[in-house]
Image (cartoon, grey):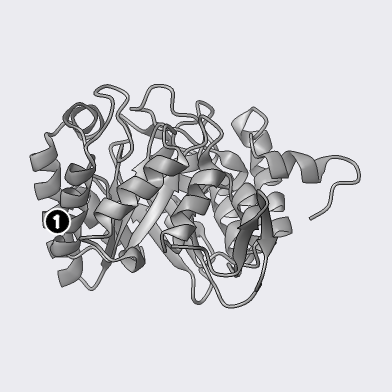
Amino acid sequence: MALPGVRFQNGLLWMVDRSGRSVTIVEVGPRDGLQNESAFVPTAEKIAFVDRLSNAGHSVIEVSAFVSPRWVPQMADAAEVFAGITRRPGVIYTAIVPNVQGLARALAANVDAVAVFPAASETFTRRNLNQSVAEAMASAKAVCGEAWAAGLRVRGYLSVAFGCPFEGPVNNELVATLAEQLIEFGVYEVALSDTIGIAHPGQVSSLLDVVEARVPAAQLALHFHDTRGMALANVYAGLEAGVSTFDASAGGLGGCPYAPGATGNLATEDLLYLLDGLGVITGVRLNDVVEASAAVESHVGHALPSRVLRALRRPGGRA
């Protein structure tokens, strides 16, 4: 399916109609971005990071994770972060939970929504959740049941949907089956996740062809890492396939502690530069995201990888 408002001619991309299409960006920097950082970011700085992202116009922010602090120490202060943020009207503040115990902690922290995160390979699921795929799906189903009973919406990640660091290629039909099951459990959206940044646009298109035969594009999101520099091209392939929700992380923060070689997430700044250029409406202000990334950068102890962030911070750089 062609992306409304653009066409190719003589190998070039041309804008035809800049109006009418909107995309939701799920900002995952405070959780997926920070979880793999070796330097512990102080709780107050995490709170300030979330508040700056709220002020940038985000409508969905993944704030933290109610997981074992033994395994993911960066997320040990999840409840304190939720207690400290300034909640803006209309913004959904979410967290991931691995099981019903994590859900209970999330409910106590007054989250707006939660996410479960099974995976499409046995080895990765065992490394990430210490469960089989079947057990992880059963846990996701249990979380969905209890969350819905409490009036809480649930998102579903499907990790390593494009390839596993331990098992290699993942079958598209398996991904479609698991995504369909998550929808049946009650999740409102499934984020097909390129956990190790191995996907390319042709693979994105082929996987979505299979998955969208079972799950409507309106209930799908895409979560890309930029390990091989393909994240923005993959977003474009997703747009062409009708997907309108994309995860991104301010500054390109991120990586998965259980996925060897997984580098940063798709940077929010880079995604915004693409979407703004295509005339796609997001409601998120690029310059404000740059400020949020710049403020947190000193606390992680290294430069953030976003190309647009680096360009805008150079002398003479501007949005």
Q: From what the image shows, is residue 66 above or below residue 189?
A: above
Mark 1 Cα within 10 Å, few/some/many (few <14, many 20+)? some
Q: Residue at x 34, y 60 (%)?
A: 220
From the top left corner, tell me how far across and down residue 5 is, in percent: 60, 69
The image quadrant where one finds the C terminus is bottom right
Q: Residue at x 51, y 30 (%)?
A: 227
Q: Residue furthest front?
A: 10
Horizontal placement of 184 versus 151: left or right?
A: left
From the top left corner, tell me how far across and down residue 58 is, in percent: 55, 64
Q: From what the image shows, is residue 298 above or below residue 6?
A: above
Q: Secondary structure at mark 1?
A: helix
From the top left corner, tell me how far across and down residue 154 is, in percent: 27, 62
Horizontal placement of 217 versus 201: left or right?
A: left
| Residue 155 appears in the picture as rendered | yes
Looking at the image, which is closer to me, 9 or 287? 9
Looking at the image, which is closer to me, 112 or 201? 201
Q: Amino acid at mark 1?
A: Gln
Q: Residue at x 13, y 38 (%)?
A: 133
| Residue 143 appears in the picture as rendered | no
Q: Residue furthest right?
A: 316
Q: How many marks?
A: 1
Looking at the image, which is closer to me, 150 or 33? 33
The quadrant in which residue 129 appears is top left
> Can you identify the residue that label 1 sits on?
181
Horizontal placement of 85 versus 96: left or right?
A: right
The image quadrant where one finds the N terminus is bottom left
From the top left corner, tell me how far across and down residue 116 is, in percent: 25, 51
